[in-house]
Image: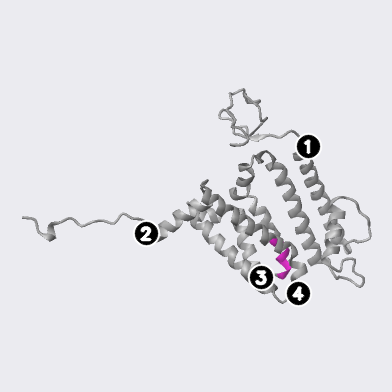
Amino acid sequence: MATKQDKPMRTDNRPSGFRRLRSTLRLLYHSQSPGAQRFQFSVLVVDLAIIAFFIATPLLRENEAFLWIDYSIAALLAADLVARALASTDIMRWLKQMPVIVDIFILATLLAPTWLVSLGFLRILRLWTLTRTSGFWRPLKKRGLGAYQEAVQAVINLLVFLFVVTGFVYTAFANRGEEPSIDGYIDALYFTVATVTTTGFGDITLPGTWGKLASIVIMIIGISLFVRLAQSIFRPNKVHFPCPQCGLQKHDPDAVHCKACGHVLNIPDHGNH
């Protein structure tokens, strides 16, 4: 006769709270559901607002509320990093990715704004790391604008370069020497744009040998980015679709066969790609 002790014990196969949290975050950051897309769009809007603050930081640094805003953004960025880490399938591999390393560095500049003030101009790299996430491009592809991804990326690369160089010039050369050419952030931005576009008015220059070398590097990289931008705008649009046979990534939108190996392609429509 069976007793209470003989009854098999029930095992609880329900996932733990931590596992449910990771599963929920995975769905929010990577799912295509309407709720997840609304969440991703909200995160994108917040990220763009943060980037706008980074661009305006040199003009807002003397404001009394600057540190409060700075630490609030640090809290948001830290929460986003933790959430993205939990949403990843392999946290250690995720931590080794360059965009994640850059975001952690940006978080450090936010947590120690007075100690790392000379490196604060690198915060604009957050715009570059943002474009390395699927959440940035998914809304564009959803609206049939995926074909313009290369052009948008080229514009963003140029903007990031302009503001990084402007911050560097402002930090390294502003108010240096007896008669400084650069005495404010706007002067630094004006010099950067004039140098990158090779206009070279000559009314603002960087002093000394290091200033000349910096100007040369800025011009060379700036011209390369402008050429890249022109190529992405004026050459025919390509779609990203790996050929199953040879792996060629880009094809004409109406291509039926791969131009490298002749394999038959089945490229989805732009609206679904």
Image quarter of the N terminus: bottom left
Q: Position of residue 79 (x, y in %)?
A: 55, 63
State the residue in front, 158 or 220.
158
Closer mark to the observer between disc 1 and disc 3: 3
Tell me the amino acid under the disc marked 1: Phe
Is disc 3 surrounded by few (<14), some (14 to 19) or many (20+) residues within 10 Å?
Answer: some
Q: CA distance from mark 1 to mark 2?
A: 53 Å
**Can residue 122 be found in the magenta stretch?**
yes
Residue bearing the label numbered 1:
234
Q: Position of residue 141 (x, y in %)?
A: 62, 42
Q: Are marks 2 and 4 in contact (CB under 8 Å)?
A: no
Tell me the amino acid under the disc marked 3: Ile
Residue 231 horizontal side relative to residue 68, left or right:
right
Instruction: Of the two numbered discs 4 and 1 on the same chain, state the one appearing first in sequence.
Output: 4
| Residue 16, disc | 2
| Residue 62, disc | 4
Residue range in magenta is 117-123
